[in-house]
Amino acid sequence: MSTDLRIGVIGAGLMGADHISRITHRTAGAVVSAVVEPVAGRAAAAAANAPGAQTFTRVEDAIDAGALDAVLIATPGQFHEPVLIPALEAGLPILCEKPLTPDSGSSWKILELEQKLDRPHIQVGFMRRFDAEYRALRELVAAGDSGELMLLRCAHRSATVPDTYTQTMLITDSVVHEFDVVPWLAGSPIKSVEVKYPRRNSLTPAHLREPILVMIELENGVLADVEMNVSMQFGYQVATEAVFEKGLARIGQPSGLQQWRDGRYSIADHASFVTRFAAAYDAQIQRWVDAIHSGALIDGPNAWDGYLVALACEAGVKALDGGVVPVGAPTRPAFYA
């Protein structure tokens, strides 16, 4: 491996282009050496932000050409498995944007393939674990200074969503993040999921029924509720309130420009996840690159974490039709201990 880690970015859409810019301009010890994207115009536009990068239409071709040392997968979830398999077979370190795969069956297949290697090679891109506020809250939970954690109240709000956004994506594309970060914060796996429907927002697209309230019960007794709302109009907001035995803690509060004018007070909030979690994405990529240079290969959620989230998403999708749906998982393989 050269001094700089040569990263092949798979997918040059919104996330892929964002990661290419991030690696080129803000990540130490790495360069984008390959862009894999079947749409020629999109590939060329992305590669223009990565000096010297080669473009390919298939990940297999990039691997065969020796054009990369590691793979960052930024395609839609349904295209992850066809990239993960050849990358694992080549023994490459991988950062895979969420989800690992769209369902637990294919995720398990990836786990089986990865366990043929000497150690975990896949890091899953749940970026909230790298957000400074989430990390501070987790440290507060672990310290126990406010007593035991009893309840988490989460809000996940978007202004609008594209026409291609479906009802199940409320779970698989959005609440998927809470299915990772809630157990991580509370230190306990998910036991069950339930979905409730408040009054429908009149601004919601006709093909959607939302907002939804997702109830998550953890094995240690902690309860979390997630307000998932994709038609709020005003901007993007992800916030959490933690209820302890002896106090409260909140993260994700507006922290932008404060303005006093015409007898009113206002504070700027985020318009999208790109700005809300910009620093978290930067930290995630940098720590992944540093881990590869150190030989550890990953420094964050692994493929087992991705598999557990896939199980929770399946339960969440089923819960959209009513009832409390249990989330059962097999014993964690020693490989992921």
Image: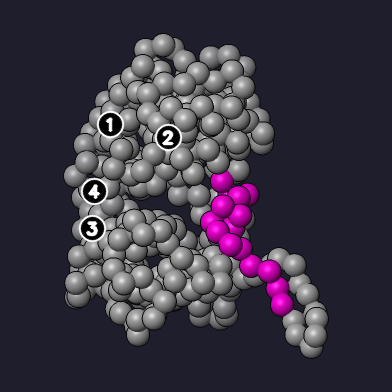
Look at mark 3 in the image and give the residue it sits on: 314
Note whether residue 320 is visible: yes
Q: Amino acid at mark 2?
A: Gly
Whichever of labels 4 and 2 marks the residue nearer the N terminus, that label is 2
Image quarter hosting the C terminus: top left
Q: Which residue is mark 4?
A: 103
Q: Nearer the viewer, residue 278 or 210?
A: 210
Classed neighbour count for the residue bearing mark 3: other residues with Cα under 10 Å, few (<14), some (14–19), many (≥20): some
| Residue type at tag 3 | Glu
Measured in 3D between alpha carbons, the distance from the residue under mark 1 to the one under mark 3, in whole angstroms, is 21 Å
- Amino acid residing under circle 4: Asp
Q: Residue at x 47, y 15 (%)?
A: 67
Q: In the rendered structure, are the residues bearing label 4 and label 3 in contact, judged by CB atoms less than 8 Å apart?
A: yes
Residue at (61% x, 63% y) in the render: 270
Of mark 1 and mark 2, the one earlier in the sequence is 2
Residue beneath disc 1: 82
Residue 108: x and y, percent? 22, 41
Extreme residue in the bottom direction = 263
Front residue of this view, candidates 69 and 308? 69
Q: Gap in Å between the C-alphas at discs 1 and 4?
A: 14 Å
Name the image colouring.
one colour
Give the image location of residue 246, x and y in percent.
56, 81
Residue 325: image quadrant is: bottom left
How much space separates mark 1 and mark 2, taking CA atoms?
A: 12 Å
At numbered mark 2, what does the secondary structure look like: helix, strand or loop?
loop
Task: Classify 84 as above or below 186.
Answer: above
Q: Which residue is mark 2?
A: 11
In the current view of this chain or complex, which residue is farthest to the top?
A: 65
The earlier-in-sequence mark between 3 and 2 is 2
Report the residue at 24% width, 70% height from top: 320
Determine the image quadrant of residue 96.
top left
Give the magenta range: 266-281
